[in-house]
Image (cartoon, rainbow, N blue to C red):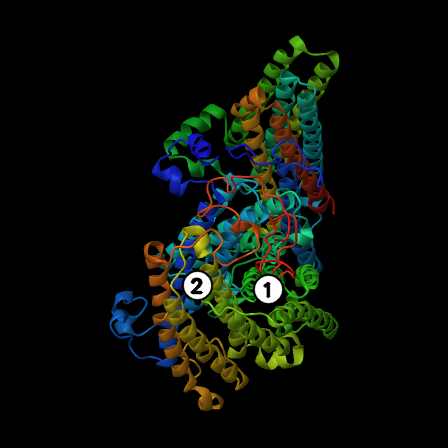
Amino acid sequence: MTSDHNAHHPKVGFWRQYVFNTDHKMIGLWYGITALFFLFFGFCLVMLMRWQLAYPGVALPVIGKWFGESRMPDGVMLPELYNQLGAMHGTIMVFMGIVPLAVGAYGNVLIPLMIGAPDMAFPKINLASYWAYFIGGVIMLASFFVPGGAAAAGWTSYAPLAVISTMGQTMWIIGMVFLITSSLLGAVNFLTTIIQMRAPGLTFMKLPFFVWAQFITAFLLLLAFPPLEAAAVMQLMDRVAHTSFFMPSGLMVSGQPLQISGGGSVLLWQHLFWFLAHPEVYVLILPAMGIVSEIIANNSRKPLWGYKAMVFSLIFLGFMSFIVWAHHMYITGMGTGISSFFQATTMIISIPSVIILTALFLSLWGGSIRFNTPMLFALAFLPMFGIGGLTGLPLGLSTPDIHLHDTYYVIGHFHYIVAPGTIFALFAGIYYWYPKLTGRKMNEFLGHLHFWPTLVCMNFLFMPMLIQGLAGVSRRLYDGGMEYSHAQGVMHLNGVMSYAAWIMALFQIPFIINILLSLKGGEKVNDNPWGSTTLEWATATPPPHGNFAFDPKVYRGPYEYSVPGASVDYTPQYQEKVI
Amino acid sequence: MSSVHVLPYTVSPRQDTGLFNAKLGIWLFLGSEVMLFGGLFSAYILLRMGAPNWPMGSTILSIPIGTFNTIVLITSSVTMVMAWVSLKLQELKKFRMYLGLTILLALTFLMVKAFEYGAKFSIHYHEYFPALFNLAVHRLAGGIAAMALVPKCILGFFFLWAVWSLAQVAFKDFSRFVRTAILLISVIAFIGIILTLFELGNRHSHHNFPPSYSTYMAIYFTLTGLHGLHVLGGIIVNGYFWGPGRRMWLDQPERFTNRIEVAGLYWHFVDLVWIFLFPVLYLL
C-alpha cells in the first residue's frame, strides 16, 4: 500500500510541498507556527506595558531607545503608545494567537485524524482560510507603522472613541474582516468535515470529546462572527464615509462639534461587539477543555467520567452563550428588567461549565495517574480554570459588577481563564501530540522546567490583579493608579506582577529549546506511545498524505481504558475485539 | 480505499445525512450570511426606533426602479434553476444560455443600481476633467446634463446588443417557449433602462445624498452596497461556470451539476436578501 501511495504522488516543488500544500496537517502546522509567533509577540507587548506599570515614567533601559521619539522619547513610554499596546495585546492574543492555535492548528491537525477522514472536506478552502488569517495578521502588524500608530481604542474598539481615532483603527477593521473571513471558512470546513466524513461506525456519541468541543466551537464561530463583521463594516463606513451609525447627535471633540449627521447609537456597537465576543469566550475555552479531556482520560487510564453529561453540557453551553452577551454591559445603564434576564442566563450558563469541570475532576478518581508533562499542564488547567470561572460569578451579577467592572479584577478573572487555563491546555496538547507528528517525544526534564515556574509565575501575575481590583484600581490607567489615594496600599503589587511576567518569559525558553531540539534529539517512539484509544494513533507516524493506509472502522467508544478482562489497559476504537 | 486518497461524498450524498459535502457547506455558509445581514437589519431597526424622524424611502428612492430591479432578480433566480435543470437533462447548450441569462440579469441589476447610486450625488463631471478637455467634450455633447447620459446610454446599448446577440444564437436551436422567454426578458430590460434614464432626468443634479447625509442614507448605502458585493460575487462564480469552469462537465458531469446547484442556492439567497431589502428601504 505504502509504495503504491508514493507512486501516485509525483515529487512536488518546495512551494507546493510547504507553502501551498492543501494537506490538513501542513495547514494546521502553519496555523500553529504563526499563532505561536503571535502569542509571543502579544506577550512582548504586555511585557513593555508591565514596565510602565511597575515604574511609571522611568526610562526603559537598553531597548527603550529603539522605539523612536514619537513612541518613547528618551525611553519613556508615551500614553499613546501604552494605549496602542493595550489594544493590540488583546486583539493579537485573542484573534491572532489563541483562536488560530486552538481552532486553526489543533482542529486542522487532529479532527480528520480523529474521525478517520483522509483530509478536510474542502482542502482548498482550508488553505484559503489560513492565508486570510495570515494577511489579516500582516495588516495588524503593519498598523504599528502608520501615522498615529496602531489601534488604540481597546480590543473592544468602542465607539465613538474608535471612530474618531487615527488611521490604525481603519487598519484594525480591515485586519479584522480578514480574520473573520478566515474563521468563517474554517468553521464551515470543520462542521462539514465532522458531519460528513466520520469513519464507518463512528457515531456522534462515539466521537472523542475533543472533536465535540471543536464541533460546538465551529458553530459559535460560524454564527457569532458575522454580526461583528456587520459592525466592522458599519464602523468602517463611520470612519471612511463619515456616516453616523455609532455617532450620537451633538458629539463634541476637543471642544468642537463634529460635522456629522448624528442620530447613531454608541450602544449598538457594544451590543454587536459582545454578541460576538461572548461566544468568543467559549471559542477560547471549549477547545482547551477538549484537549484536557483527551489527556486526562489517557493519563489516568480511565474512561472520562460522565461523557454523555459532558457532551450535553457542551451543547447547552454553546446555545446559552448566545444569550448572555449583555452581562458585559451592566454599567451602560440598562433597565432592571433586561439586567435581570441577563443575570439569570449568566448564572444558568455557569452550570454546564461546572458539570464539565466536575466530570474532569471525577475522572481522576481512582485512576493510576501518569504525571508526565502533558498531564501536569492538563491537571493545572483544572484549578486554574476553576479560579477563573468562580471569579467570574460576581461579574455576572450586576450589583457587584458595578463596583468591579472597570477594575483590574476583570483583567485578573479573564486572564485566569485564558492564560493558565487555555494556554496551559494548548501547551499540554503540544507535549501530547508532538510524538504523533514527529515520531519523537519531547524532553521530560525541560518540560518540568517549563511547567513549574510557569505555573508559579502565572499565579504571581494574576492573583494580585484580583486583589488590586477589589481595592478599586482602575484597569485603564497609564500609570497603574499611582495618583489614586485609595490604591496606595496595593500599588507595590505592580512590581510583583511585572517581575512575574518577565520571569515567566524566561521560562518559556526551555519550551522553545525543547520543541526545536526534540525534532532531532527526542526519544524515538512508536505510533501509539501513550497507549491511547482514539483513531489518530492508529495511523503511521507522521501520518502520510491521505492519513490512513487502510479503511478505518470504529467499533467502540473513545475512552475504553482499563476494560475489565482485557490484557492491556487500553482498547482502541479501531479494535474489533477486546484482547 | 484506493491508495490515491479521494475525499468521500464530493459527488454522491452520504447516506445518513442525505447531503454531499458542498451542499452542507453552502447551507452552513448561508447560515452565517443570515447572521451577517441579520446584524445589519437589527442595526436598522434599533437606529430607526431611536430616530426622531425617518424619511419615507419613496421620497428619496424611486419605487418603479426598485420594483424593476426586484423583478430582474426574481427572474434571474428562475433562470438559475432552469440552468440547473438543463444540466440534469444533459443539455449543456441550454444550460449555457440560462446561466448566461442569469449573469446578464445580474449585470442589469448592478447597472440599474449604479444609476441609482449615481443619481444620489450631484456630480459635476467638469470637475473630473481638465478644463480644455472639458470644453471640447462640453461642446460635443451639448452640455453637462447630456454628458451625464452618455456613459449610461453606452452601457444600455451594450446591454441591449448583448441580449440581442444572445437571442440570435438562441433563436436557431430552441423552442418557441424559450424564444418567448428571451424576448420577454429583453423587453423587461429595455423598460428598465428607459425607467432609469427617466429617473436620471428627474433627479439628476438637484440634490446630493451621500451616505453621510442621514442615518437612512447610511443604511441604504451600506445594506445595498453589501448586497451588491454579493451580487458581484455571484456574477464571478457563475461567470466561471459559464466559461472555463464548464470543462468539468466533460469528465465529471454529476459533480458539475452539483456545483451549479450549490451556486444556485447561493444565488437564491442573494435574491432573498433583496426581497427583504426592497420593502425595508423603498416602501417602509
Q: What residue did someone put label 1 on?
A: A266
In this view, A159 is above or below A27: below
Can residue A441 be seen by looking at this rendering? Answer: yes
Say which element carries label 2.
Answer: helix
In contact (CB < 8 Å): disc 1 and disc 2: no
Can residue A253 be seen by looking at this rendering? Answer: no
Say which element carries label 1.
Answer: helix
Q: Where residue A29 sits in the image (x, y, percent)?
A: 43, 50
At a point 57% along the width and 66% down the height, the residue shown is A250
Q: What residue did someone put label 2 on?
A: A88
In this view, A136 is above or below B93: below
**What residue type is disc 1 on?**
Val
Is the residue marked by circle 1 packed among few (<14), some (14-19), or many (20+) residues within 10 Å?
A: some
**Is residue B250 shown left or right of residue B127?**
right
Task: Choose top left, top right, bottom left or bottom right for residue A248.
Answer: bottom right
**What residue type is disc 2 on?**
Met
Dots 1 and 2 on the same chain: yes
Q: Where residue A227 sits in the image (x, y, percent)?
A: 61, 54
Q: Where residue B278 sits in the image (x, y, percent)?
A: 70, 41
At a point 52% along the width and 27% down the height, the residue shown is B150
Q: How many marks?
A: 2
**Is residue A392 shown left or right of residue A52?**
right
Q: Where residue A459 sits in the image (x, y, percent)?
A: 47, 78
Observer-nearest residue: A45 or A210? Answer: A210
